[in-house]
Amino acid sequence: MLVTAYLVFVVLLTSCLGLELSRCRAKPPGRACSNPSFVRFQLDFYQVYFLALAADWLQAPYLYKLYQHYHFLEGQIAILYVCGLASTVLFGLVASSLVDWLGRKKSCVLFSLTYSLCCLTKLSRDYFVLLVGRALGGLSTALLFSAFEAWYIHEHLERHDFPAEWIPATFARAAFWNHVLAIVAGVAAEAVACWMGLGPVAPFVAAIPLLALAGALALHNWGENYDRQRAFSRTCAGGLRCLLSDRRVLLLGTIQALFESVIFIFVFLWTPVLDPHGAPLGIIFSSFMAASLLGSSLYRIATSKRYHLQPMHLLSLAVLIVVFSLFMLTFSTSPGQESPVESFIAFLLIELACGLYFPSMSFLRRKVIPETEQAGVLNWFRVPLHLLACLGLLVLHDSDRKTGTRNMFSICSAVMVMALLAVVGLFTVVRHDAELRVSSPNGEPYAPEL
């Protein structure tokens, strides 16, 4: 398993580099890239945002392993994950209002403080302290995915008065480098935890200086901005009306809730499936992220002028790949007949599918959901998503260890078949909808999808 992991990582990394280099050679530089003021503004944003992302990714490979290292049972670890998911959905519902009220810059600094405290709780073996850490992690995640983007968009439009058309360029580049940071973070986590022999808590300690630096740079270099708050009840009511009045939105929300809840459960299960067979967890994680980056690159190629596939087609393909992978996992995790290499391949296929799914879903959401109602609709999407994931982990908590993992993959397979039926329903509704087709002049997808 050790040799397989490193070999697969090298192959995936080489494939990603080849595709990205060919894309860079073929794509002419845009007008925004030649504006010195805009480039400086981007760099001010990136140096803080990338540090925050790097600290987040650095913790991912060894979270389950750390709890296992502290001799907690799988059921106890499942409860810790449920606590993290529950806090994410609760804080996620109010994150936008909190950020607008507190201020975007202060919210980014608050993120660095709460996430640093979350990392410090990992030094304790006390179960209650670890539960508090998971709650802090949920708050930090909600801030990471709301405060930074809100700060940038306000500064871009209001303070610097750059064209709105340049915003996608920033987030397209951020999406690519987010993948790269995740790959590097996996290798770094492996280095500090295993190569240096510092143990599974080391990546969490290593993340703290990155978070401190991100907070300090934001405090020193960024200006503060606020926004007018829309009442939370009005936001949710408007989102619910949009959800119930448009069948496309309802089907899209169903697909997102089913697909992403399965992905949350996959995030929990991959470590106990592969770790007993001597898998290098950091390299495995980097391989997952490389597979996801490969999927994103394939999305760009598939929606280009040469092939002209549509996001709806690629969304269908992503769901099919996950269904196939989960069926593979029900056999490869059979008690007494485990096949870690087959499980690893199935996990890689799931990550490849994620690379296709997320840009496809982003494109369809942007086209189907009115911009003024997106926050409210996404709140309603998140609730069933996290409830399904929590329910799955609680079912696993009550299962026998030897059969529970296989049974959970079987349940996930059934959930993904339901997602596939929802995709078929959505495809039937939108097949003649020209609005949901990629139609940029150069054949490239819009940058936010990346």
Image (tube, helix red, strand yellow):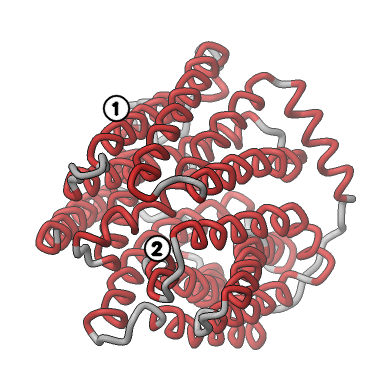
Element on which disc 1 rests: loop
Q: Position of residue 79 (x, y in %)?
A: 56, 58
| Residue that appears at 42% across and 65% down | 64
First-in-chain label (2 vs 1): 2
| Residue that appears at 73% across and 77% down | 106
| Residue that appears at 42% across and 39% down | 408
Q: Position of residue 268 (x, y in %)?
A: 43, 54
The reply to whether dot 2 and dot 1 touch (C-beta < 8 Å) is no
Looking at the image, can residue 156 be seen?
no
Rendered position, 354 above or below 168? above
Q: Horizontally, is 18 left or right of 62 in the view?
A: left
Q: Which is more toward the observer, 406 or 346?
A: 406
Q: Position of residue 110 (x, y in %)?
A: 69, 77
Residue located beneath label 1 in the image: 307
User: Within 10 Å of the Cα at label 1, are there few (<14), some (14-19), or many (20+) other Cα atoms?
Assistant: few
Name which residue type carries label 2.
Answer: Trp
Q: Which is more toward the observer, 116 or 161?
A: 116
- How far apart, in angstroms, are the residues tagged by discs 2 and 1? 25 Å
Name which residue type carries label 1.
Answer: Tyr
Q: Position of residue 450 (x, y in %)?
A: 44, 47
- The count of marks equals 2
Q: Which is more toward the observer, 160 or 337?
A: 337
Q: Horizontally, is 442 left or right of 84 in the view?
A: left
Looking at the image, can residue 433 be seen?
yes
Element on which disc 2 rests: helix
Residue located beneath label 2 in the image: 177
Rendered position, 401 above or below 445? below
| Residue that appears at 64% across and 57% down | 88
Q: List the single residue furthest toward the front.
A: 400
Quadrant where the N terminus sits is bottom left
Rendered position, 125 above or below 283? below
